[in-house]
Amino acid sequence: MSQAGNTVKIFDTTLRDGEQSPGCSMTLRQKLKVAQALAELRVDIIEAGFPAASPGDFEAVQRIASEIEGPVICGLARCVEGDILACRDALAPAKRKRIHVFIATSPIHREHKLKMSKEAIIEQAVKGVKLARQYFDDVEFSAEDGIRTERDYLAEVFSAAVEAGASTLNVPDTVGYSVPSEMSDLFHYLRQHIRGVENVTLSVHCHDDLGMAVANSLSAVEAGARQVECTINGIGERAGNCSLEEVVMALKTRKDYFNLETGIETRKLYPTSRLVSDVTGAEVARNKAIVGDNAFAHEAGIHQHGMLQNPDTYEIMRPEDVGISRSSLVLGKHSGRHAFRERAEALGFDKLDDEAFEQGFQAFKKLADKKKEIFDSDIEAILMGIDESQPGTWSLASLQVHSACGTATRPTATVVLQHIDGHQVTEAATGDGPIDAVFKAIERATGISPTLSDFRVRSVSLGEDAQGQADVTAEYQGRFWRGRGLNTDIIAATTEAFLEMINRIIRTADTAQAQPQSKIDAL
């Protein structure tokens, strides 16, 4: 039978079922863009829409049928004449086309929605398939809510559809009710009880209400289905549909188990996912399988060490296979020295001695307690700022700044500085602003009062918790001095910069008498 082959067709319904997801509607231009991406992804069938639903849907299906080549272009229709004729007209320009007709079959739909008898539904199904066959060689028939339909009756409906001319039979889990073992058992049953099943392709369409859409789809495939209906990122009604990227990569990664394959160009999965997310506004969860930001990201030190030795230790597929450039060793508070050194070397800091490396690593761990994620720019800023000379005479023990709104109260800063010999000095000052107050308090504590000539603050990394880099330049005894500070708090960064400058003045005075000159002391 046709479904006994080893190729699984991928029927993408992102533009039809996916777009029905609340908030995921697309403009005509966006639909054409997504359809082109799906063609490049090499899906077998694109369900472009429901032409009878609205003039906009009709136009979208017609434009896709006219402009997109490669996949079969499909339109959805109820088993009624008006829907079928709308599909005929909308799909007329397509070189390869299919009509997908459906009718509900479960007791709850028969009694409460359609108010039709079993016999009347079969009659309507046959009539719809026969009419569709007058205009299409490729006719798919779906029994809506098939999972909750009596098995013997479902087989009877499908048998009648085959006799009427359907070439694909789709079993929808319309409300995401099934479980994998039940799905597998149902497909085994249908393969044994549908008359003429050897001449058609069995298809499965699962929703994710219980979080089992992919698992149910794979169970159906294992039991003989050779078409999976799915969407990019799993978008769709309610909790969504079977995720295309997940079912495709499951078949590819576990080919040893399924012994099946698809025609999908998997390296297009990630860019297609991002495109659909962008046009629909439906963000992809960070922990989403295959295409989420964390799918190939590793933060735990043990995992990172294993990845550096051999990626197979913690990855069952290559990121390049889904269109991601490389795995990401996310540097955070759980990362270890191996990952930090690897990233430092990748950024060009491959000649750090052990002392400089350890100093950088400790600065990184301190920053990681403040930031959720460390970016390359953070690492560069840390390593470029390492001062490999002697420790400074003064270090910041604590800082408090009070800055009131209005003109009645001036900002106040209190600093506690730790001297290299162990004693502490506490000083407070007011200023025209919080930065001015900090500078004056440090000047009082150290006894050094340079004249500020330049002060700049800029962001050196990404994110809401990005680091701020402060650069301070001042003149003291005829010479210009510079200091730099790095912190997620810009006032703290400024304080560190000013204190570094003070330490340089003191360090130079301790080794030689500072001579007036007009150049800036290098970092």
Image (cartoon, rainbow, N blue to C red):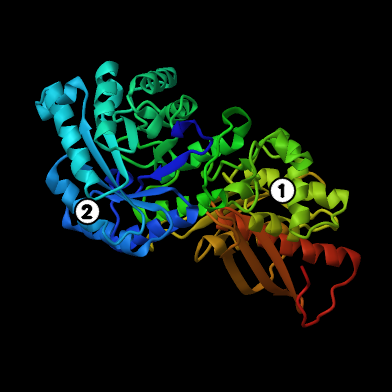
- Identify the image quadrant of residue 151: top left
- Give me the residue at 49% from left, 30% from top: 4
User: Which element carries disc 2, helix, strand or loop?
Assistant: helix
- Give me the residue at 18% from left, 28% from top: 122
Q: CA distance from mark 1 to mark 2?
A: 67 Å
Q: Earlier in the sequence, mark 1 or mark 2?
A: 2
Which residue is denoted by mark 1 in the rendering?
Answer: 363
For residue 357, above or below residue 438: above
For residue 402, above or below residue 242: below
Indicate the amino acid at tag 2: Arg
Of 113 and 82, the residue lying toward us: 82
Q: Which residue ends up furthest to the right in the rendered image? A: 511
Q: Which residue ends up furthest to the bottom in the rendered image? A: 518
Q: Position of residue 230 (x, y in %)?
A: 40, 40
Q: Position of residue 487 (x, y in %)?
A: 61, 54
Tag shown at residue 88? 2
